[in-house]
Image (cartoon, rainbow, N blue to C red):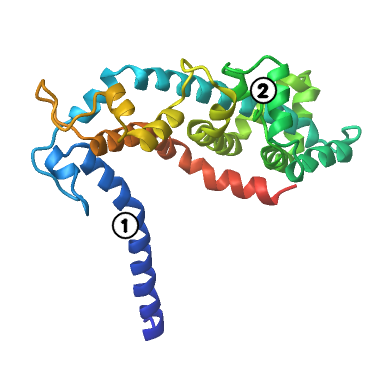
C-alpha cells in the first residue's frame, strides 16, 4: 500500500527524532571515552572530543594502581550482590501469600504496604533507628533499610495473581507443600518479573550513594559512587591530586590529566552495570507489563 505524503513526512520526522535522541545518549559516553584515553594536550582542551591522536591508557593504570578503586569495587559488588539477592527473595516471599485471596486479612496487609508508598519515617528517624540497631559503618546499613519496596511487592504480587491456579492445585494434590510449590513451580514460571525486579535492584544498588554518605563514616568502607563523587568534586584540588597522583606529565612517562582521570573513573564505574542490561532486557518489557496490569 502506497503511503501518503503526510505519512512519509511523519516517518522521516520520526526517524530523525529517534536518531537525535540516540546521538544525545551516545555522544556523552563517547566524549568520556575519548577524554579518558587522550594525552594531556588534548584532554585539557575545551570543546568536543570525538577523536584522539596518540591514545594511551595511562589514566586507567593510574586509578587502579592507587588501590582505592579496587577497594571501592569490592564494597560495591558486595552491596549489589547481597542487596539484590535479599531484595528479590524477600519481596517474592512477601508477594506470594498476598496473591492468595484466601489469606486472612489480605486487604489489611496490602493497605499497610501501600501506606508506606505515600508516608515514610523521614531521614532523621531512620538514621536514629540505624544507629540504635548498631548498623552504622556496616554493609547492612546499605542493604537492609531498602530491602524491599511496596511498589516491588505490588508488581510481583500482580504477576503471581496472573499465574494459573490449576498448576499449584495439581502440585498440592501430589503432596507438595506451599514452600515446595513456591520454589519449584511459582518462581520458575515467574522468570520475567524476577528478572525485572533483579534489574531494578541491580541498578539501584550499584548507583546508590546517598545512604552510603549518611550511614558510612568509616573511610575503609567506600562504594564506587562515593569515590566517584569525591573525585568529581575534588579532582582539581591539591589534596585529591596528591591522593591519585594526578599530574600533567608523570615522571615515569605516563601521561594523564585530572580530566582524563575523572573520565576514566566515570567509565569504570558505569560500564559493569551497563553490561547487565543485554542479558535481562528480553524479560523486562514482558515482566513490567504483566505485573502492572494483572491482578
Q: Nearer the viewer, residue 145 or 189?
A: 145
Question: Residue at label 2?
Answer: 183
Where is residue 102 drawn, in percent x and y? 88, 35
List the single residue furthest toward the front.
Answer: 238
Q: Name the residue located 72 percent from the left edge and 27 percent from the top edge.
A: 93
Q: Which residue is mark 1?
A: 23
Q: Position of residue 41 (x, y in %)?
A: 12, 42
Q: Is residue 272 visible?
A: no
User: Secondary structure under badge 1?
Assistant: helix
**269 or 288, nearer to the observer:** 269
Crowding near the residue tagged with mark 1, few <14, some 14–19, many ≥20 C-alpha atoms within 10 Å: few
Asked whether, in this view, residue 261 is left or right of residue 8, the answer is left
The x, y position of residue 196, in whole percent, is: 56, 39
Q: Is residue 79 above or below residue 248?
A: above
Mark 2: give few (<14), some (14-19) or many (20+) Cα within 10 Å.
few
Q: Earlier in the sequence, mark 1 or mark 2?
A: 1
* 294 relative to 86, above or below: below
The image quarter in which residue 9 lies: bottom left
As drawn, 221 above or below 48: above
Q: Is residue 272 left or right of residue 215?
A: left
Q: Residue furthest bottom?
A: 5
Q: Position of residue 60 (x, y in %)?
A: 24, 28
Residue 225 location, quadrant: top left
Q: Gap between marks 1 and 2, in whole Å?
A: 44 Å
Residue 234 visible, this orientation: yes
- The residue at the point 47 percent across, 19 percent down is 75
Instruction: Point out the image quarter for the N terminus.
Output: bottom left
Amino acid at each position: 500500500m502506497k503511503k501518503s505524503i503526510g505519512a512519509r513526512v511523519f516517518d522521516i520526522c520520526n526517524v530523525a527524532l529517534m536518531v537525535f535522541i540516540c546521538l544525545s545518549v551516545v555522544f556523552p559516553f563517547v566524549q568520556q571515552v575519548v577524554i579518558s584515553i587522550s594525552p594531556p594536550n588534548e584532554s585539557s582542551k575545551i570543546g568536543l572530543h570525538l577523536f584522539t591522536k596518540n591514545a594511551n591508557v595511562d589514566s586507567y593504570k593510574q586509578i587502579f594502581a592507587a588501590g582505592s578503586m579496587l577497594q571501592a569495587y569490592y564494597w560495591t559488588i558486595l552491596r549489589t550482590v547481597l542487596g539484590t539477592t535479599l531484595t528479590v527473595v524477600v519481596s517474592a516471599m512477601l508477594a506470594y501469600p498476598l496473591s492468595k485471596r484466601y489469606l486472612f486479612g489480605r486487604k489489611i496487609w496490602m493497605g499497610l504496604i501501600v501506606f508506606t508508598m505515600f508516608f515514610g519515617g523521614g531521614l532523621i528517624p531512620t538514621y536514629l533507628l540505624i544507629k540504635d540497631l548498631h548498623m552504622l559503618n556496616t554493609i547492612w546499613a546499605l542493604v537492609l533499610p531498602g530491602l524491599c519496596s511496596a511498589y516491588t511487592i505490588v508488581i510481583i504480587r500482580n504477576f503471581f495473581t496472573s499465574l494459573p491456579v490449576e498448576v499449584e492445585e495439581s502440585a498440592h494434590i501430589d503432596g507438595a507443600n506451599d514452600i515446595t510449590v513456591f520454589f519449584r513451580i511459582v518462581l520458575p514460571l515467574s522468570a520475567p518479573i524476577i528478572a525485572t525486579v533483579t534489574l531494578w535492584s541491580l541498578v539501584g544498588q550499584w548507583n546508590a550513594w546517598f545512604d552510603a554518605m549518611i550511614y558510612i563514616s568509616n573511610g575503609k568502607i567506600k562504594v564506587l559512587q562515593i569515590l566517584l563523587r569525591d573525585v568529581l568534586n575534588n579532582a582539581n584540588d591539591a589534596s585529591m591530586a596528591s591522593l591519585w597522583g594526578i599530574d600533567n606529565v608523570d615522571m615515569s612517562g605516563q601521561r594523564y590529566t585530572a580530566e582524563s582521570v575523572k573520565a576514566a573513573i566515570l567509565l569504570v564505574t558505569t560500564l559493569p552495570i551497563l553490561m547487565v542490561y543485554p542479558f535481562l532486557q528480553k524479560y523486562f518489557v514482558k515482566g513490567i507489563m504483566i505485573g502492572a496490569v494483572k491482578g
